[in-house]
Amino acid sequence: MSDTSLSYVQLETITAKAPPPAPSNRPWTPVRIVGTTWLTLWLLSGLGILWFLLNSNHVALVFGGDGLLPVSITHNAKFLIKYGEKFVSGFIVTLQLVGIAMLLGVLLSVPMTFMRMSKNRILGGIAYGYVYFFRGTPLLAQVFLIYYGAGTFRIPLQSVDMWWFFRDAWNCAVLAFTLNTAAYQVEILRGSIENIAKGQWEAAAALGLPKWLTFWKIILPQALIVSLRPYGNEIILMIKGSAIVAIITIFDLMGETRRAFSRTYDFQAYVWAAIAYLVMVEALRRVWDLIEARLTRHLHR
Amino acid sequence: MGFMRFATVATLALLASTQSQAKDWSKIRIATEASYPPFAYTTADGKLAGFEIELGNAICEELKAECEWMPVDWDGLIPGLIAGKYDSIMASMSITPERKQRIQFSEKYYNTPPGIAVPKDSPITEATIDGMKGYLVGAQVGATHAVFAEEILSKSEVSLYPTADEYKLDLESGRLDAAVDDVVVLTDWLNSDEGACCKLLGTMTPVPEIHGEGAGVGVRKSDQDLADLFSKAVIALRTNGKYKEINDKYFEFDAYGE
């Protein structure tokens, strides 16, 4: 009985198994056609950019020769040899500018957030006006106003001994970027703090914890999880937004790109700039994943 | 057969006529663009005027030739010359290797030099590389003058601005000690109300590798003799002071450059 039943069961099991669907049998629905076409176009444009870069630098394979391999690569990267160093220095300027402005922005945004959330109408009004102005006007206009605007107030600024600060383009750039990013950070921070349920404050108060400790140990760690992604977005926007800083003679990555392009009319300048920005943003994204994993480790099961 | 013979004769006759014309330059037809003041432009009553026109007339006087001016659109200048509609071009045309492949040029008849503008109370006294040592000089990025500032003014600090408007603002605010640009551009600004803060310190010698060789008279490749006539006439006008006379009517600097 066991023999027959076993064979019966096996037979049934095997036949009952649905054969794996053959991919070739999938119908070419309009969606699939559009998707495949789209993917192909992306691949082609990626290959096109690669081909363009190789071609611009006259990279070629040479067969034969007396090297170790029968094939050697020749190139004539005139552009990179001449402007590569400038690109690196522009890259560093961009990193420094965004890094310093973000750190100062954090320092400025924390007290500003408390002002924004305070019940005092004057403090709240000041913080509201500040956020309103810096979020509502273009960064380009702010940089321009701070740098060239300060220039027209040279005499009054000299009389209060502030001209030395505004005379330097770098100071003006850092100031403008800090003020701009701090305004956005105030809103990020405020949103994430207000996102934490009121009951958490009340429970901590019931335990007799002082307010600052409640904020530091209970509210902030939770608010950080909420605000982490918006912070990352803000840094990415700053990295790309910093491309306008060449207007006040700070030659960041984009400034060096434009300069190199205006000297050579070689489009690879912009391709390299795009790649450099992509690398920056991608590195940031990976760091952010790590930070998020760390902050939410108590949520993993 | 008859046609071929006719064509040959006609071609020979045509060649002969151009040949004979090439020898005799008592009449010269000059094309200009007439829309580039103060060099060449059309006045309200439709007459040609400007530095180039006066200089051209002086050259013809020097060559004892009769000159006829023809206003032509920029793009049509070189094709019209090659087609034989006129004999020469005086249209602020810079001598470049690309153009030299198609036409012949005389020696330059002007090359506006780079000018140096400084605030009126500037301690800088001379427009030289050493005179600007250690000072902050502004220029417009992308322009030849930015290359000039970075490569020739090696003893100064250089700040590059997106357009001319920004370096003007910084020259006014005192962030910049000096600015370098085409002297025609600078004088235009300095002579206006906006340029009241500053003055023209002087001009510097153009560098051919950076600024180009300057503007020359364009002629057909076969008319080297005409190009030489123009070159000689310009030198003669430089020597006898007529160039300076015309120059001073239009510019506060020597447009010949050097």
Image (cartoon, coloured by chain):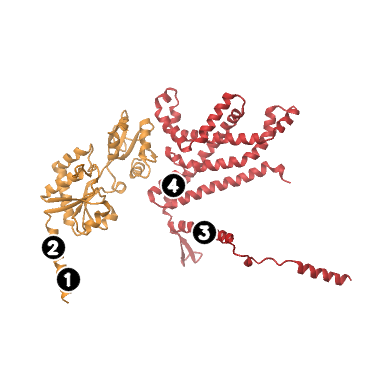
Chain colours: A red, B orange
Which element is circle 4 on?
A: helix
Q: Is residue A181 above or below residue A85?
A: above
Q: Residue, x 27% and y 55% (percent of image)?
A: B99
**Residue B231 in view in this figure:** yes
Residue bearing mark 1? B7
Give x and y (percent) for residue A90.
Answer: 47, 43
In contact (CB < 8 Å): disc 3 and disc 1: no
Same chain, marks 3 and 4?
yes
Residue bearing mark 3? A41
**Pointer 3 chain:** A
Same chain, marks 2 and 1?
yes
**Pointer 4 chain:** A
What is the count of numbered marks? 4
Give x and y (percent) for residue B224.
Answer: 18, 57
Mark nearer the viewer, 4 or 1: 1
Looking at marks 2 and 1 on the same chain, the residue that comes earlier in the sequence is marked by 1
Residue bearing mark 2? B17
Q: Amino acid at mark 4?
A: Thr
Q: Residue, x 65% and y 34% (percent of image)?
A: A194
Task: Give the numbered dot on residue A257.
Answer: 4
Same chain, marks 4 and 1?
no
Give x and y (percent) for residue A300.
Answer: 72, 45
Same chain, marks 2 and 3?
no
Q: Residue, x 13% and y 49% (percent of image)?
A: B60
In contact (CB < 8 Å): disc 4 and disc 1: no
Mark nearer the viewer, 3 or 4: 3
